[in-house]
Amino acid sequence: MAIRRGRGVAAVNYPTGMNLGGDPSQALVHSTPTGNFMVTLSSVDLGQGLKQVMAQICAETIGVKTEQVIIDTADTDTGPHCMGTFASRGTHRIGNAVIQAAKEARQVMLEVAAEALEVDAGDLETDGEGNIHVKGAPQKSISIFDTALMAHFKLGRSISGRGMFLVPRSYPEVETGAMKPSTCYAHACTVAEVDVDDETGEVTVVSIKNVFEIGRALNPKMVEQQLVGGSWMGISHALYETTEPYYPARDHAGTDFNEYLMPGPGDIAPTEIVVLERPAEDGPYGAKGPGEMCANPQIPALANAIFDAVGVRIDMMPITPERILRALKEQRATAH
Amino acid sequence: MAKVPVQFSLNGEEKAEFVDSGSTLLKVLRDKMGDTSPKGGCLQGTCGSCSVVVDGELRLSCLTLAETCDGADIQTTAGLASDGVLHPLQRAFMDEFAAQCGFCTPGMIMAAKVLLDANPDPTREDVIEALSGNVCRCTGYEPIIRAVLTAARSNSQNAA
Ligand code: FES
Ligand code: FES
């Protein structure tokens, strides 16, 4: 009986978003009387940073500072349609909708400014600081605040835009079953190192090294935050967490926090994260979806590492000491 | 149900309320006193999100009866910032990106505060031990551990 070290690797090719009956998200953008911009969504921020990233996307597209954008995700009853924030789809789908809405709003904004400055809208540009000026003649300028006031009080126009992003439903080809469930894919690869105690079946994760390819990281710190938390969640799914330990039987299933094995800060593994950026052609400023994707490669990598350590293949999650011991017992029985 | 009077200091302010006998401190803080910084996660003492400090000790407010806190000095995350200046722990949680959904954050911060009050220069193991009663779904814990160590360092720099 001994502690055995093993190493495993796994890679995933992960669709951004999903495709059941089509995958739409909408956004509405309008200027407020203070020259700020409001983005109305019904996409929920679960803490992954959707509001921040949508504000960045809108600001970048209209040509204002991020602080000038207000994101309202208040109500799924009254907001524009969104399929939801899941399946690593938020940044990509909603971001594209925000870009479209913001482009339309920017166009109206430039038309209003063009009237004020008596020039052609095509000759105008934004300085990113809250002003619009004639290309090559920055002194011929109007603030976005004044532009909003002019639109509202003089021209009777609404500086606003509508955005819709839809990945249409993909039907499988009858002959081959081939289909196109997604328009872009993120990628990840994990190398896991484990110690397995072949007497107790206990697994200690010695290290987890991940590489994530996520298009463009629109907010690098928040991406890192997602990846660190997601990597840990992957380990937790691989080794600890389940509501159905003896699926399909419900025996011993946890019914509350006392019985559901949720690891704490003492159980984390030394983790490395590397981010690769290969912008997606149809991504908002190149972004793909890192959220759900990042919690996947750890699971097969750990299963492979355990196989490498003690020679048993566990194909049920989580890989508990009990499952490892049963597999080892079977291995010994067939060896004789 | 019979009401009982309770009186305690909450973040330095004297509070008095008539509460249903048997009410938890969590319920009284949130529903009666409008301090929603302690969060009700499991309501059975296993997640730590409701942690508050009672007379200097970390307590799970979901398992603490309000009437046992008569005369006590209670601190919650809502009272940490003073004059608009964040507590070093709050600042460190922001700087280290140690919150995502934020549900565990007030409990984590109070657990960390009790640790740093007793041990201003903790090791990584001390921090993990102090936070071991608090679970977090989102962060993978590492940013939280880092934030507590960062806060400890900034405290000792300020003291120096
Ligand atoms: S709510 Fe008190 S410990 Fe979970
Ligand atoms: S930040 Fe979401 S539970 Fe900790």
Image (cartoon, coloured by chain):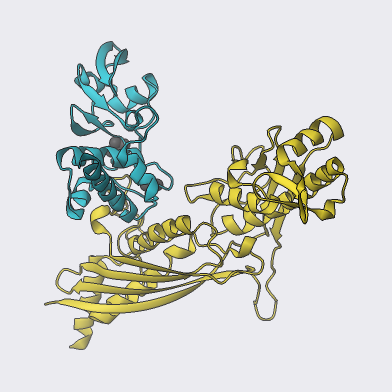
Chain colours: A yellow, B cyan
List the single residue furthest toward the bottom.
A336
Asked whether residue A57 appears in the rendered view, the answer is yes
Asked whether residue A262 appears in the rendered view, the answer is no
Q: Quadrant of the C terminus of chain A?
A: bottom left
Q: Position of residue A148 (x, y in %)?
A: 75, 37
Q: Position of residue A133 (x, y in %)?
A: 76, 49
The residue lying at 30 percent from left, 64 percent from top is A239
Return the residue nearer the eye: B152 or A89. B152
List the single residue furthest toward the left.
A1
Residue A261 horizontal side relative to residue A279, left or right: left
Question: How many numbered marks are there?
Answer: 0
Q: Position of residue A64 (x, y in %)?
A: 65, 47
The residue lying at 87 percent from left, 51 percent from top is A120
Residue B132 horizontal side relative to residue A60, left or right: left
Residue A42 horizontal side relative to residue A231, left or right: right
Q: Quadrant of residue A229?
A: bottom left
Q: Quadrant of the N terminus of chain A?
A: bottom left
The residue lying at 36 percent from left, 57 percent from top is A244
Rendering quadrant holding ligand 1: top left
Does residue B119 lie above or below B27 as drawn? Answer: below
Does residue B105 lie above or below A175 as drawn? Answer: above
Return the residue nearer the eye: B45 or A147. A147
Does residue B17 lie above or below A104 as drawn? Answer: above
Q: Position of residue A217 (x, y in %)?
A: 53, 62
